[in-house]
Amino acid sequence: MKNIAVTGSSGFVGKYLCESLSKKYTIIKIGNRKKIQYLKNIKKFNILIHLAFKKKINNKNDNLHNILITKKLLDYCIKYKSSMIFISTFNTDPYTSNFFYNSKYILSKKHCEDLCKLYANKYGLNIIILRTFNIYDNNLTQQNLFKKIINNHKNKKITY
Protein backbone atom coordinates (compact mmCIF):
# COMPACT_ATOMS: atom_id res chain seq x y z
CA MET A 1 0.00 0.00 0.00
CA LYS A 2 1.28 3.46 -0.86
CA ASN A 3 1.85 6.15 1.75
CA ILE A 4 0.60 9.59 0.74
CA ALA A 5 1.70 12.60 2.79
CA VAL A 6 -0.60 15.62 2.71
CA THR A 7 0.46 19.04 3.95
CA GLY A 8 -2.45 21.25 4.91
CA SER A 9 -4.42 18.11 5.77
CA SER A 10 -6.66 20.01 8.18
CA GLY A 11 -7.48 22.76 5.67
CA PHE A 12 -10.45 23.22 3.35
CA VAL A 13 -9.20 20.97 0.51
CA GLY A 14 -6.95 18.80 2.68
CA LYS A 15 -9.68 17.41 4.91
CA TYR A 16 -11.78 16.25 1.94
CA LEU A 17 -8.76 14.92 0.09
CA CYS A 18 -7.50 12.91 3.09
CA GLU A 19 -10.96 11.49 3.72
CA SER A 20 -11.24 10.33 0.12
CA LEU A 21 -7.68 8.98 -0.21
CA SER A 22 -7.79 7.14 3.13
CA LYS A 23 -10.18 4.61 1.59
CA LYS A 24 -7.37 3.27 -0.59
CA TYR A 25 -4.06 4.58 0.81
CA THR A 26 -2.23 5.15 4.07
CA ILE A 27 -2.35 8.90 4.72
CA ILE A 28 0.34 10.82 6.59
CA LYS A 29 -1.31 14.05 7.74
CA ILE A 30 1.19 16.84 8.08
CA GLY A 31 -1.25 19.56 9.11
CA ASN A 32 -0.65 23.21 8.53
CA ARG A 33 2.45 25.05 7.29
CA LYS A 34 3.46 26.17 10.81
CA LYS A 35 4.00 22.54 11.82
CA ILE A 36 6.03 21.77 8.70
CA GLN A 37 8.86 24.14 9.58
CA TYR A 38 9.56 22.23 12.80
CA LEU A 39 9.52 18.73 11.34
CA LYS A 40 12.73 16.82 11.87
CA ASN A 41 11.60 13.65 10.15
CA ILE A 42 8.50 12.87 8.18
CA LYS A 43 7.50 9.23 7.92
CA LYS A 44 8.51 7.76 4.54
CA PHE A 45 5.96 8.47 1.81
CA ASN A 46 5.55 7.62 -1.87
CA ILE A 47 3.67 10.75 -2.86
CA LEU A 48 3.49 14.17 -1.23
CA ILE A 49 0.53 16.46 -1.90
CA HIS A 50 1.54 19.98 -0.89
CA LEU A 51 -1.51 22.06 0.07
CA ALA A 52 -0.19 24.09 3.03
CA PHE A 53 0.56 27.67 2.04
CA LYS A 54 0.51 31.08 3.70
CA LYS A 55 -2.21 33.06 1.93
CA LYS A 56 -1.74 36.49 3.46
CA ILE A 57 1.60 37.64 2.09
CA ASN A 58 2.44 40.89 3.84
CA ASN A 59 6.16 41.10 3.15
CA LYS A 60 9.20 39.36 1.61
CA ASN A 61 9.57 37.13 4.68
CA ASP A 62 6.10 35.61 4.15
CA ASN A 63 6.98 34.81 0.53
CA LEU A 64 10.36 33.43 1.58
CA HIS A 65 8.65 31.28 4.23
CA ASN A 66 6.45 29.63 1.57
CA ILE A 67 9.49 29.01 -0.61
CA LEU A 68 11.56 27.53 2.23
CA ILE A 69 8.73 25.20 3.31
CA THR A 70 8.34 24.03 -0.29
CA LYS A 71 12.12 23.50 -0.53
CA LYS A 72 12.14 21.45 2.68
CA LEU A 73 9.36 19.26 1.30
CA LEU A 74 11.15 18.85 -2.03
CA ASP A 75 14.24 17.75 -0.12
CA TYR A 76 12.13 15.08 1.61
CA CYS A 77 10.97 13.94 -1.83
CA ILE A 78 14.61 13.50 -2.85
CA LYS A 79 15.36 11.65 0.40
CA TYR A 80 12.47 9.22 -0.08
CA LYS A 81 12.60 9.10 -3.91
CA SER A 82 8.99 10.25 -3.89
CA SER A 83 6.74 12.22 -6.20
CA MET A 84 5.12 15.56 -5.39
CA ILE A 85 1.84 17.14 -6.36
CA PHE A 86 2.06 20.89 -5.79
CA ILE A 87 -1.29 22.65 -5.64
CA SER A 88 -0.87 26.06 -7.17
CA THR A 89 -3.44 28.60 -8.28
CA PHE A 90 -4.98 29.38 -11.62
CA ASN A 91 -4.14 32.89 -12.67
CA THR A 92 -2.68 32.73 -16.13
CA ASP A 93 -3.36 34.06 -19.57
CA PRO A 94 -5.01 31.06 -21.26
CA TYR A 95 -3.32 31.88 -24.57
CA THR A 96 0.27 32.29 -23.37
CA SER A 97 0.41 30.52 -19.95
CA ASN A 98 1.94 33.72 -18.53
CA PHE A 99 1.05 34.46 -14.94
CA PHE A 100 -0.90 37.57 -14.02
CA TYR A 101 1.04 38.88 -11.03
CA ASN A 102 -1.85 40.76 -9.49
CA SER A 103 -1.29 39.54 -5.96
CA LYS A 104 1.57 38.65 -3.65
CA TYR A 105 -0.08 35.27 -3.03
CA ILE A 106 -0.01 34.40 -6.74
CA LEU A 107 3.57 35.56 -7.05
CA SER A 108 4.51 33.39 -4.05
CA LYS A 109 2.82 30.38 -5.70
CA LYS A 110 4.72 31.14 -8.92
CA HIS A 111 8.05 31.21 -7.06
CA CYS A 112 7.26 27.79 -5.56
CA GLU A 113 6.23 26.45 -8.97
CA ASP A 114 9.60 27.60 -10.32
CA LEU A 115 11.36 25.83 -7.44
CA CYS A 116 9.42 22.62 -8.21
CA LYS A 117 10.45 22.86 -11.87
CA LEU A 118 14.08 23.38 -10.84
CA TYR A 119 14.00 20.24 -8.67
CA ALA A 120 12.31 18.27 -11.44
CA ASN A 121 15.01 19.28 -13.94
CA LYS A 122 18.00 19.08 -11.62
CA TYR A 123 17.13 15.97 -9.58
CA GLY A 124 14.69 14.19 -11.86
CA LEU A 125 11.84 14.42 -9.34
CA ASN A 126 8.42 13.49 -10.61
CA ILE A 127 6.41 16.65 -9.87
CA ILE A 128 2.91 17.58 -10.95
CA ILE A 129 1.78 21.18 -10.61
CA LEU A 130 -2.00 21.61 -10.42
CA ARG A 131 -3.36 25.09 -10.97
CA THR A 132 -6.76 24.95 -9.37
CA PHE A 133 -9.42 27.54 -10.00
CA ASN A 134 -11.88 28.73 -7.37
CA ILE A 135 -12.59 25.50 -5.53
CA TYR A 136 -16.18 25.56 -4.28
CA ASP A 137 -18.04 24.37 -1.20
CA ASN A 138 -21.35 25.54 0.30
CA ASN A 139 -19.54 26.67 3.44
CA LEU A 140 -17.26 29.14 1.67
CA THR A 141 -17.40 32.85 2.28
CA GLN A 142 -19.13 35.29 -0.02
CA GLN A 143 -15.77 36.28 -1.58
CA ASN A 144 -15.61 33.02 -3.55
CA LEU A 145 -16.48 33.62 -7.21
CA PHE A 146 -18.93 30.72 -7.51
CA LYS A 147 -20.63 31.64 -4.25
CA LYS A 148 -21.16 35.17 -5.59
CA ILE A 149 -22.57 33.91 -8.88
CA ILE A 150 -24.98 31.50 -7.16
CA ASN A 151 -26.15 34.13 -4.66
CA ASN A 152 -26.59 36.73 -7.39
CA HIS A 153 -28.66 34.27 -9.40
CA LYS A 154 -30.83 33.45 -6.37
CA ASN A 155 -31.35 37.16 -5.66
CA LYS A 156 -31.83 37.97 -9.36
CA LYS A 157 -28.91 40.40 -9.24
CA ILE A 158 -26.73 40.96 -12.26
CA THR A 159 -23.21 42.22 -11.68
CA TYR A 160 -20.58 43.10 -14.24
Image (cartoon, rainbow, N blue to C red):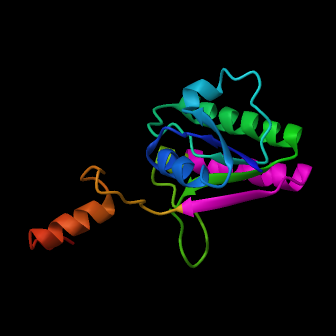
| Residue 142 image position (x, y, % from top left) | 24, 53
Find the residue positioned furthest to the bottom.
95
Q: Quarter-wise, where is residue 155 in the image?
A: bottom left
Q: Residue at x 90, y 54 (%)?
A: 124
Q: Which residues are magenta?
A: 108-131
Residue 100 versus residue 144: which sits nearer the camera? 144
Q: Residue at x 80, y 37 (%)?
A: 44
Dominant SS type (magenta)? helix
Q: Quarter-wise, where is residue 36 in the image?
A: top right
Placement of 147 over or under 50, stated as above or below: below
Q: Is residue 4 left or right of residue 118?
A: left
Magenta-colored stretch includes residue 123 = yes
Quadrant holding the C terminus: bottom left
Placement of 15 over or under 72, stated as above or below: below
Q: Quarter-wise, where is residue 34 in the image?
A: top right
| Residue 123 image position (x, y, % from top left) | 90, 49
Residue 79 versus residue 91: which sits nearer the camera? 79
Residue 109 versus residue 72: which sits nearer the camera? 72
Placement of 127 over or under 35, stated as above or below: below
Find the residue positioned furthest to the right.
123
| Residue 96 image position (x, y, % from top left) | 61, 75
Magenta-colored stretch includes residue 59 = no
Q: Residue at x 54, y 40 (%)?
A: 9
Placement of 109 over or under 7, stated as above or below: below
| Residue 82 image position (x, y, % from top left) | 82, 48
Please give the count of numbered marks on the rendered protein: 0
Q: Residue at x 22, y 68 (%)?
A: 150
